[in-house]
Amino acid sequence: MPDRPMPIHSDAARVVPDIVNGDRMADVIFICDHASNVIPPDLAGLGLPPAALALHIAWDIGAADITRRLAGAFGAPAVLATVSRLVLDVNRFLDDPASLLAQSDGIEVPGNRGASAEERHARAARIFHPYHAATCRLITRQVAAGRRPALVAVHSCTDRMEGVPRPWHVGVLWGRDDRLARPLLASLGSQTGIVVGDNQPYSLQLVRGYTTEVHGEHRGLPYVALEIRQDLIADPAGAAAWAGRIAAGLSAALASLD
């Protein structure tokens, strides 16, 4: 395994995010920052065994499936990242040490160890900036057409952390703007059998999320980030069921914004 960070070659192509329904006009836009566990070939898997890339440290398991289903249900645009969060986390500010981890959930990431400022800059140019530029263009197009779309960032989380079970089926995360969060918490909470977390298991009032802060709060758009438990959506049947539940709750919440 390497004892130094894997360099990104200067001629490496910029990574293009996956855009779904990019030409659609809608009242909501879906974003999936951790949709993929792919590591570009020139990074040699960051020195990790292939099995590690199937774990939650590499991506948000089930989140891409949910995002695509929601985009289909609403006829809405969606932007999905196409590179693992281990290469660079596009939902972290670039000066956040958590944007490029040498260890994640106790697993060493050899290809990130000792990453220099130059290497961080190269990865940002290849991955971070193209992803957020594409997201910005998509939102700008909607706004220019006279819409004020809500932004929904789709994430997933493990069912336990450090041995402690997480009781929430889905968490609704928000920072300073609760316009969408409050009605969504109510509409999801009204569905039988769903345990909903209000800024649980994470809080955007404590941990900054780049996507919701920059594309949501800074633009004055209503937004939420969703954290859906991975054990519920790891297979297509589970993803379909939970996409339906979330779509029903989100439809009611969006209607309350009118």
Image (cartoon, rainbow, N blue to C red):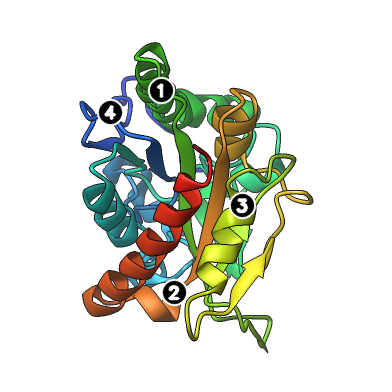
The front one of 54 and 136 is: 136
**Amino acid on which disc 2 is placed:** Gln
**Is the residue under label 4 in contact with that under label 1 (CB below 8 Å)?**
yes
At x 23%, y 73%, the residue is: 236
Determine the secondary structure under disc 2.
helix
How far is disc 1 from disc 2 in space, using C-alphas? 33 Å
Which of the two discs, 2 and 4, labels the residue nearer the N terminus?
A: 4
Please provide percent x and percent y for residue 84. 40, 50
**Amino acid on which disc 3 is placed:** Ala
Looking at the rendered image, the disc whose residue lies closer to the viewer, 1 or 2, is 1
Q: Using the image, tell me which numbered label, if any, was put on residue 230.
A: 2
How far is disc 1 from disc 4 in space, using C-alphas? 8 Å
At x 55%, y 37%, the residue is: 211
- Whether 81 is drawn above or below 171: the answer is above
**Residue to which mark 3 is pinned:** 181
Determine the secondary structure under disc 3.
helix
**Amino acid on which disc 1 is placed:** Arg
At x 24%, y 53%, the residue is: 73
Residue 204 in view (yes/no) = yes
At x 50%, y 52%, the residue is: 253
Residue 102 in view (yes/no) = no
**Is the residue under label 2 in contact with that under label 1 (CB below 8 Å)?**
no
Judge left or right: residue 223 versus residue 67.
right
Which of the two discs, 3 and 2, labels the residue nearer the N terminus?
A: 3
Q: Using the image, tell me which numbered label, if any, was put on residue 221.
A: none
Which of the two discs, 3 and 1, labels the residue nearer the N terminus?
A: 1
**Residue to which mark 4 is pinned:** 25
Looking at the rendered image, the disc whose residue lies closer to the viewer, 2 or 4, is 4
